[in-house]
Amino acid sequence: MVCVRIVVDPDISYARSGDLHIAYVATGAGGGIDALLLARHVSHLAQWFAIPRLVSNLSRLEALGRLIMLDGRGMGLSDRMIGSQLPTIEDRVDDARAVLDAAGSSRALICALADSGPLACLFAAAHPERTLGLVLMNTRPRIAWGPDYPWGMREAEYRRELRRVAERWGTRALAEEDAREFAFGMSYADAFSWHLDHMRRSAGPGDAAALLRMFYESDVRDVLGTIRVPTLVLTRGGEMAEEGRSFAGLIPGARHQIMPGSSRFVVGDHTDVYFDATLAFARELADEEAELESILATVLFTDIVGSTEKQAELGDRRWAELVREHHRIVRGCLARYRGRELDTAGDGFFAAFDGPVRGIRCAQAIVSGVRDLGLEVRAGLHTGECRTIDGKVGGLAVSIGARVSTLARPSEILVSQTVRDLVAGSGLALSDRGEHELKGVPGAWRVYAAG
């Protein structure tokens, strides 16, 4: 397993979301999958990199490509909220989108911990084009208890927690309580220091209470049915398993997986198991994306016969004029038959079509059109699965098409057996030209000439 050592004190950047500045970090070399990790309702970016158990797993997410994390409005290094206005979940979705824009991320795997579930779900529902997939770790669509949501927090419990936050946030006494309950794999002394620093650096008591109130009042169950991205719901066993199954059942096609341990916090215990599942899911999505980038296409290769001799005969200036006219004719034929020009190298063209008949008709038009210029071209076609690699079409099908073209005589159009089989019944006349070895391509290939 390749594992990048994550920067413990990463550079902080800022994205503009409306009138506010949203702090974020984006670490990793890129070139793979962007993972946007949404943490608790109150956070401070630097604090998350102070938990060894979490850092080792964040580095695994980073190794996918890039890890992106943010402090939402009203917390951490982001701007505090203006006045006493309570942010909405939609505001937080805008913050996440602004961060992805600023980081240059067109699409990301959205990973949600703790109470960031509603935010992640709403983002995926509103911006499926920006969401590669959704991983929900011990989170929920609603925090408040209700007759139709028996797993939520009762009103009395919520009021106690709200008072606790408003009156004791940032105190040593509260840090001691939290350290005893949530040590996150650290010693008591280290956990105490972490909780105290986290409270004092992430938000003031008023903002912390306001953010708790925002999440308590959120309920995104009505939008879960509109999520159309691959989703993985990870929850502990016991009562949380029942809640997780209900959660996953509201999202079309979502997968539910039971995790070991008993802590509601992912970093409480068995943290690595959550990230094992997340990484496996991410790689599954990457493989699926690669398959989806494969297309069935008919590729066409053409080049001018005897170009070197012709250039020597005409001279560079006249030859350049002739090549420009050749290109004009070829591009006109491509436009007529809905071909896509993929590459031009000197006097040759590489194009693709969504059907073999159009490809052959286009080749015939090119052969006929350039003849009036005193030129002859050879052409080859093959239909097969092509892959998009760095924006370019490649794969074995392309190599076969190129090799077939080299077998053609002047003004001849050769096609593979695959093309011949696909155009049966089209009225095109094809003559058998026998079997041939294609350089670099295994097996013998029968080719046909299009009249």
Image (cartoon, helix red, strand yellow):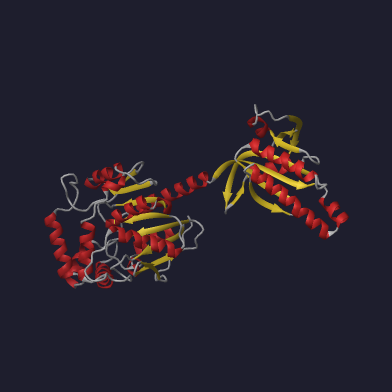
Number of labels in the image equals 0
Q: Residue at x 33, y 71 (%)?
A: 77
Quarter of the rendering containing residue 440: top right
Task: Please state the horizontal and vertical placement of residue 137, each as a whole percent of the image.
Answer: 32, 52
Please state which of residues 193 and 201 is positioned toward the viewer in this rendering: 201
Residue situated furthest right in the rendering:
313
Image check: 33 left or right of 271?
right
**220 in relation to 45, above or below:** above
Quarter of the rendering containing residue 22: bottom left
Task: Please state the horizontal and vertical placement of residue 451, each as a whole percent of the image.
Answer: 75, 33
Task: Please state the horizontal and vertical placement of residue 69, each as a whole percent of the image.
Answer: 38, 63
**310 in relation to 188, above or below:** above
Q: Let me know if residue 71 appears in the view.
A: yes
Task: Please state the horizontal and vertical placement of residue 217, each as a whole percent of the image.
Answer: 21, 56
Q: Residue at x 58, y 46 (%)?
A: 387
Quarter of the rendering containing residue 433: top right
Q: Residue at x 83, y 48 (%)?
A: 306
Q: Let me know if residue 268 appears in the view.
A: no
Residue situated furthest top in the rendering:
425
